[in-house]
Image (cartoon, grey):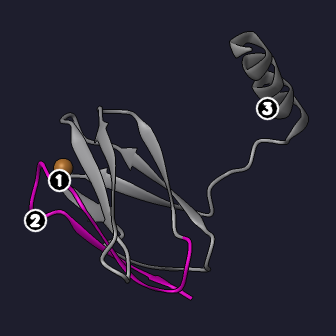
């Protein structure tokens, strides 16, 4: 059963062309660059840790729902999706001054 799931996943990955994220944000000098962003509903954003320290990503949606994407190490890229319209806040729980505002249209 587990092997079948792995094989199915491998086939899906092989069949679908790699989809790049719609936007890219850097985590650099313990700040988000850019710090303000506008995307379309359903967009995904790559967060690239360009620092030499770990960062965390937490998303707070327009309805207050929180999503924690965990810790990203230096050099890692994490993808975050933005489902519905509204104002989202993204922050780093390790560095409280790191804040990003994302408007989803
Ligand atoms: Cu951080």
Mark 1 and mark 2 in contact (Cβ < 8 Å)?
yes
Q: Is residue 102 above or below residue 23?
A: below
Tell which tag, 1 or 3, sits nearer the viewer. Answer: 3
Mark 3 and mark 1 in contact (Cβ < 8 Å)?
no
The disc, 2 or 3, on the residue closer to the chain's N-terminal end is 3
Residue located beneath label 2 in the image: 97
Q: In this view, does 14 lie above or below 97?
A: above
From the image, which quarter does the N terminus lie in?
top right
Residue located beneath label 3 in the image: 13
Residue drawn at (18%, 36%), measured in percent from left and top? 53
- Is 62 part of what is drawn in magenta? no
Q: Nearer the viewer, residue 103 or 23?
A: 103
Residue drawn at (29%, 57%), measured in percent from left and top? 58
The disc, 1 or 3, on the residue closer to the chain's N-terminal end is 3
Residue located beneath label 1 in the image: 30
x then y, percent, for residue 57: 30, 52
x then y, percent, for residue 55: 23, 44
* Residue 26, quarter of the rendered image: bottom left
Dot 2 lies on which element? loop
Mark 3 and mark 2 in contact (Cβ < 8 Å)?
no
From the image, which quarter does the C terminus lie in?
bottom right
Name the side, left or right, on which 9 lies relative to 69: right
The disc, 2 or 1, on the residue closer to the chain's N-terminal end is 1
Query: Is the CB of the residue bearing disc 1 within 8 angstroms of ligand 1?
Result: yes
Q: Give the range drawn in magenta.
A: 83-105
Dot 1 lies on which element? loop
């Amino acid at each position: 059963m587990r092997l079948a799931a792995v094989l199915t996943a491998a086939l899906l990955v092989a069949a679908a062309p790699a989809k790049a994220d719609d936007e890219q944000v850097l985590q650099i000098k313990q700040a988000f660059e850019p710090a303000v962003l506008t995307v379309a509903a359903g967009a995904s954003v790559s967060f690239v840790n360009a620092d030499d320290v770990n960062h965390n990503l937490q998303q707070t949606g327009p309805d207050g729902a929180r999503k924690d994407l965990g810790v990203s190490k230096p050099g890692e890229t994490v993808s975050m999706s933005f489902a519905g319209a509204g104002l989202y806040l993204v922050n780093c729980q390790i560095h409280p001054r790191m804040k990003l505002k994302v408007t989803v249209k």
